[in-house]
Image: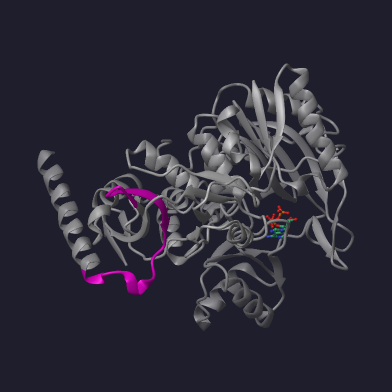
Amino acid sequence: MKIGCFVETYCFHLKDEAQALELFKATAEARGHEFEFIYKKDMNRIPEFDAIFIRANTDPMNTAYVVSRLADSLGKVVIDDPHSIRTCSSKVVLHGLFEQNSIPSPRSRLFAGDYGRENLDRLFEYLQFPIVVKAPYTKFSSHVEKAHDEKEFREITARYLKNATPIVLQQFMPTAFDWRVGVLDNRVLYLCKYTMPRGGWKIRAEVDGRQVWGDTIPIFRKNIPKKLEEIAIKVSKCVGDGLYGLDVKEVDGEYYVIEINDNPSFYHGQEDAKDKDLYEKIIDRLTSGRQVKPGTYKISESQAP
Amino acid sequence: MKSSAKGDVLNVSHDYRYQKMGYYVSMHAELGGNPVTPRCSDILDTHRNPLLMMRAVKAGIPCLPYTLISRYERNVALPALCFAVNPYTCNSVTAVKSESKMLRTMKSLSVNNRYPVSVQPLIGDVREAVQVFGETDVPEARDIARKFYDEFRVPIGKLIVQIVDGEARLSHFEPVQKKEVDWGLVREKVRTLRVRTLRAHATSAHAI
Ligand SMILES: Nc1ncnc2c1ncn2[C@@H]1O[C@H](COP(=O)(O)OP(=O)(O)OP(=O)(O)O)[C@@H](O)[C@H]1O
């Protein structure tokens, strides 16, 4: 089988990320497959491949979405598939998904700019300050901010509403780490804890204009708490049977899902540190001939032409 | 503008681009579990040239061939018609007849190599046909407009066609400006659609 791995040059900037990509390639080749990195300039060649593995950032905004949709329509196995991308890339969509499927998550409300006194009082009462404000299409924590009072709330929400309506408001739920549950085919693939950088409340923070990450603590997937596993699988089944990374908070033994991401990141020595077979499992899925199926939460999909 | 019968939502807008109001209305309808016209995935397909072309060809719409390039290339056949392949594109249609113009066009349409550019041969008269529920004022483009609406169900939009030997071929799709739309026609169309929907429901009620 021939796998095309869609990347952009930035995918190779960090050493650990580049190493993980090389491990995908080596694993595929060891299993008798061809594995080629493809870029924007190779988009005309998508029909040549049996499967497409997207490692560049996905979002309906990006070229990766066009690649995914082209490959999917041509009947290729593609991870991430267009339906998963459309679902996971919007916090507004995820808000609806969690609500309709009774997924435990921080208290949330959509906000479209109703600054009427009554509405604000109701929101502040329900969510309590500080309130977490999120733009629908944030990536890398870039548009997730905390408002401590009404003045900050007005300033941040006005800024976000300029670019998108509605936005998401959430109850602030501080924890020392986020669980990261990697899921493939509605089964747990790997597990780790992403800890917050010192003094921060997000797993990524900006210090002097530079991105800093907290440490990653890898854990064998067989040791996953039962309840956490159940919730992660339930959420993944709503989206589809592709590859996902869930961010989950734990407070007093209860789990709260922050989000489910398509296109989860892989850094050699982190996500792969315990369950090293994740490379094989992903390659095997890509070469299975089985296209990713949308889950139970369907935003309607056009017929693959 | 929205009309609703039995949870069916008709979302009428002149601009459905990603993250614009027209897109959100469809998205919210889908999230609420309501069948909506147009669907988000159809909107996204129409606004990316290769996805539009791939589906249009399969739907039997006469189209022009395209190729995707990601940076300036010398060996592209000229003259060519170029389109930006990014979700916010609007007014990106550029006719290119010389190498120097190609260089400049690639730079701006690719937003400094961030997005690919779709390139088609420029072999006919380029026309813009505003399509409203499958109808258009441009006589040569009538058949394409009807087939386009049948396939993608996007109520309003601009079809860029090339007239080659008296026949239209589809090149591209773009949002329209508000002032380019005959809103009287839109209102009438919405009214007839609603009557038809109500009748259909009445008939099925009889059948039961
Ligand atoms: N309600 C909340 N309470 C406390 N922390 C939160 C809350 N929501 C998000 N966070 C933290 O903020 C960070 C970014 O949040 P989120 O994942 O929603 O946005 P993102 O931009 O998609 O980030 P990423 O791409 O890093 O996953 C995460 O580390 C998460 O733990």
Instruction: Give the answer, above or below, for where A132 lies relative to A80.
Output: below
- Judged left or right of residue B96, residue A175 is right
Say whether residue A103 is visible: no
Q: Is residue B168 magenta?
A: yes
Residue A74 image offset from top left, x and y in percent: 49, 32
Residue A71 image offset from top left, x and y in percent: 54, 35
Residue at the spot 51% in from the left edge and 55% down from the top edge:
B83
Say whether residue B205 is visible: yes
Residue A247 image offset from top left, x and y in percent: 70, 48
In what quadrant of the picture does the C terminus of chain A appear?
Answer: top left
Q: Residue furthest top?
A: A32
Residue at the spot 56% in from the left edge and 58% down from the top edge:
B98
Quadrant in the picture for residue A15: top right
> In the image shown, does A179 or B187 lie closer to the viewer?
B187
In what quadrant of the picture does the N terminus of chain A appear?
Answer: top right
Q: Residue furthest front?
A: B98
Ligand 1 lies in quarter: bottom right
Residue at the spot 59% in from the left edge and 34% down from the top edge:
A45
Q: Is residue A113 magenta?
A: no
> In the image shown, does A64 or A211 lie closer to the viewer?
A64
Residue A236 image offset from top left, x and y in percent: 59, 38
Residue at the spot 80% in from the left edge and 55% down from the top edge:
A203
Q: Which residues are magenta?
A: B163-184
Report the number of discs. Answer: 0
- Judged left or right of residue B23, residue A191 is right
> In the image shown, does B204 or A53 lie closer to the viewer?
A53
Instruction: Give the answer, above or below, for where A37 lies relative to A160.
Output: above
> In the image shown, does B181 or A121 lie closer to the viewer?
B181
Instruction: Give the answer, above or below, for where A45 lies relative to A15.
Output: above
Please say which color scheme the image uses.
one colour
